[in-house]
Image (tube, rainbow, N blue to C red):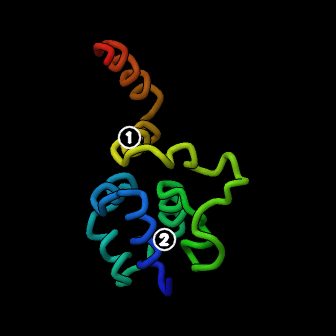
Amino acid sequence: MTNIGERITLARKQKLFSQAQLSEVLGVSRGACGQWEQGHAYPNVQHLIEIAKVLDIQLEWLATGRGEMAYSSEIKEAPGHYQASMPADEQLLISYYRKMNKQQQQALIKLAKTMPQC
């Protein structure tokens, strides 16, 4: 991969995220993700860190193209690693939950407990 846009696109597609889903998780416009992927703009450092977490990839690979894209199988607790096999919609829900304050999280848990068991 020669540029960061290609690396973002590859990682996003491997995680089965649409641009809209990734932009929503990151709290940026879909256009911003498109600009990054097309190479017309570059994500800031905080967005790079978040992209790496959300897509479960190495930050160095994302930023520079050096090293391995994925975490080594020897690393048991890589950021987001437990989510690797989750569908994109479940990952999206987790990302929303993490952005909530404690009161919102508790309200969501209370609501979930009232739902019939599947």
Residue 31 vs 73, above or below: the answer is below
Residue 51 vs residue 86, the one in the foreground: 86
Question: Is disc 1 placed on a helix, strand or loop?
Answer: helix
Q: Residues within 10 Å of mark 2 (few under 14, many from 20)?
A: few
The image position of residue 93, as x and y in percent, is 37, 39
Q: Residue at x 57, y 48 (%)?
A: 81
Q: Residue at x 38, y 64 (%)?
A: 13
The image position of residue 109, as x and y in percent, is 40, 21
Q: Residue at x 51, y 66 (%)?
A: 48
Q: Residue at x 56, y 43 (%)?
A: 82
The image position of residue 58, as x and y in percent, is 60, 64
Structural distance between the alpha carbons of marks 1 and 2: 26 Å
Residue at numbered disc 2: 44
Q: Residues within 10 Å of mark 1 (few under 14, many from 20)?
A: few
Question: Is disc 2 placed on a helix, strand or loop?
Answer: loop
Ranked by sequence position, the earlier of labels 1 and 2 is: 2
Residue at numbered disc 1: 90
Query: How many marks can you see?
Result: 2
Residue 101 vs residue 84, the one in the foreground: 84
In the image as oriented, which residue stretches furthest toward the right? 74
The image position of residue 22, as x and y in percent, is 36, 58
Left or right of residue 88, residue 98 in this image:
right
Residue 100 vs 104, above or below: the answer is below
Left or right of residue 88, residue 2 in this image:
right
Instruction: Tell me the mark number nearer the camera, choosing from 1 and 2.
Output: 1
Quarter holding the C terminus? top left
Left or right of residue 23, residue 105 in this image:
right
Residue 111 vs 19, above or below: the answer is above
